[in-house]
Amino acid sequence: MQALSRQRRWAGLPSPTAREAASMYGTAVAVFLVILVAALQGSAPPENPFPYHIPLDPEGTLELSWNVSYSQETVHFQLLVRNLKAGVLFGMSDRGELENADLVVLWTNGDSAYFGDAWSDQKGQIHLDSQQDYQLLRAQKMPEGLYLLFKRSFGTCDPKDYFIEDGTVHLVYGILEQPFLSLEAINTSVLQTGLQRVQLLKPNISVPALPEDLSTMEIRSSDILIPNQETTYWCYITELPVGFSRHHIVMYEPIVTVGNEALVHHMEVFQCAAEFESFPDFNGPCDSKMKPDRLNYCRHVLAAWALGAKAFYYPEEAGLAFGGPGSSRFLRLEVHYHNPLKIQGRRDSSGIRLYYTASLRRYDAGIMELGLVYTPVMAIPPQEPAFVLTGYCTDKCTQLALPPSGIHIFASQLHTHLTGRKVVTVLARGGHEREVVNRDNHYSPHFQEIRMLKKVVSVHPGDVLITSCTYNTEDRKLATVGGFGILEEMCVNYVHYYPQTQLELCKSAVDPGFLQKYFHLVNRFNSEDVCTCPQASVPQQFASVPWNSFNRDMLKALYGFAPISMHCNKSSAVRFQGEWDLQPLPEIISTLEEPTLRCPASQTQSPSGPTVVSIGGGRG
């Protein structure tokens, strides 16, 4: 009886009035025309219509595939719904909340099914959007589940819609288990909901040719039991064969155990420090008290993958060197498991497969750290919704350390700790900001991957690289200082470039002497004293600052004008020769504008209301 009622729920139609029938007919004609036009224009490449895909929920009920058309500024989505109940909602929001979200909803009132563009307000109440920008192209029932094919422009000029841009996108979903009389009647608080982070706008880059003598190496732990807790970071130490000579990594890809696609969130392979002859074996949670302290010296990134990413390729002319003299044989694999349902008994052997060659390419690729030095002198006051800190790689450093022909940045990995919300690195030349190296306006510390740049950025001697991070500390009562701890903060861009130079770290921090002048100023204008005695640490000083508007504004001003201490460091952690303290901030005459919303050049006629969906089987 239950199966019969479910079949009726999706297949049956109510008896409409004449006006409703006319409206449905007009909508059906409009949808048919949209499908026809899309088919004639070849809306998706036939050889691989949906190259990107991710599971949305931990149980694999919802699977999203997509493709990007930059010429049309459109994303085509294919949503597979397994074990369909009474509908599904899918969409995007600023940080993955179901409040103030841009949604598309498939729902039923018990007799007929509807597909509609919707939005949610500050309370999570869902409303039908007056502008239907999600366009349904096909709804098709297949043995594995229901396929929904729909598309949406990057920008729609609808204030209720999310602007799809470069960087992280927070996808939200919900599963409807019972019919609702109307869209507005859907109560999101009773739904099975969740979020998934992904980079939707993948760069359209051709795959480089691979050498004939390609070898592979799998860095993976063996058959571990995934802990039944929401978040686990698992660490595993392995080593290269004895006598392993110098090679170039030219590509890597994920190895994810079948069935665990929704649990393996991201993975990284680190090379350990060469100054240690050996590292102890370890295979367990990274926060375990049993983890040897020496593993903290395995920090040189060789590979990084996050959910939704495909294989990573180095440019044909460059490769990442590993093995041989001066290189550690020891590697650390770190796997982040995201298990919100606390599933028990799941075993995993996921990892990363490295593709490498003994035929060394023309250039060694390098990794350079940009941003802020890990120091407590850079701090964020508490209860700040969007506090910005900026680190510099100055013209003086690039003039001294870069070759005359410059370097070429082809990939980037942004990094902060828990309060980071936005990160951007900009290249400036002659006092003018010229181009963005990498920007993520919806950055999440829980989603970090090495991203190929859409365009290689060339950096010449005398150029300036400016990295700014925006933080949210609204849930904190004390200042958040810079440092290595997870409750401290960082602002880093690991840029991947070639040819490799001796410059490994190009970062800055405010001059410590000027920070002490700030603390003295705080004491002059406040009744509560900040200890400026030698025995007081900078974190202790920040902890005693009364965070009124004056002290907040003065700290922002300090960071905006005070001289900086530059770290223009070689791989040996020794600075290049020169004077690097009390350096003036780079003078920037003109800045780049933030990306603005662009409306589609031509709007396809879209339905004014939800589309009535008739879900049938077969391939027709």
Image (spheres, grey):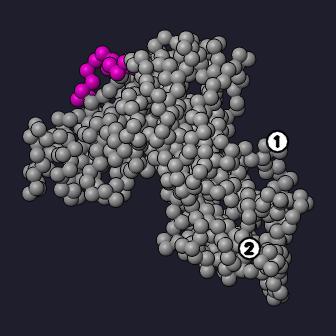
Secondary structure of residue under mark 2: strand
- Where, by quadrant of the figure, is residue 8 drawn? bottom right
> In the rendered structure, which amino acid carries the disc numbered 1?
Glu
**Residue shown at the point (48%, 39%) measured from the top left:** 284
Residue at image x 79%, y 51%? 43
Q: Is residue 579 magenta?
A: yes
The location of residue 49, given as percent across then percent down, is 78, 47
Q: Residues within 10 Å of mark 1 (few under 14, many from 20)?
A: few
Which segment did they paint magenta?
A: 570-583
Q: Position of residue 459 (x, y in %)?
A: 48, 26
Bin the neighbour count of mark 2 within 10 Å (Cα to Cα): few under 14, some 14-19, many 20 and up.
some
Considering the whole magenta stretch, tell me its main secondary structure. Answer: loop
Identify the residue shown where x is 49% and y is 53%: 229
Can residue 394 be seen here?
yes
Visible in this render: residue 550?
no
Could you tell whether 40 is left or right of 516 in the image? Answer: right
Contact? badges 2 and 1 (CB < 8 Å): no
Q: Position of residue 173 (x, y in %)?
A: 61, 62
Residue found at the very far bottom of the displayed protein: 17
Q: CA distance from mark 2 to mark 1?
A: 31 Å
Instruction: Give the residue pinned by disc 2.
Output: 114
Query: The residue under label 2 is which amino acid type?
Result: Tyr
Residue 83 lies, with reference to residue 318, above or below; the image says below
| Residue 228 falls inside the magenta stretch | no
Total numbered labels: 2
The residue that label 1 is drawn on is: 47
**Residue sitting at the far right:** 620
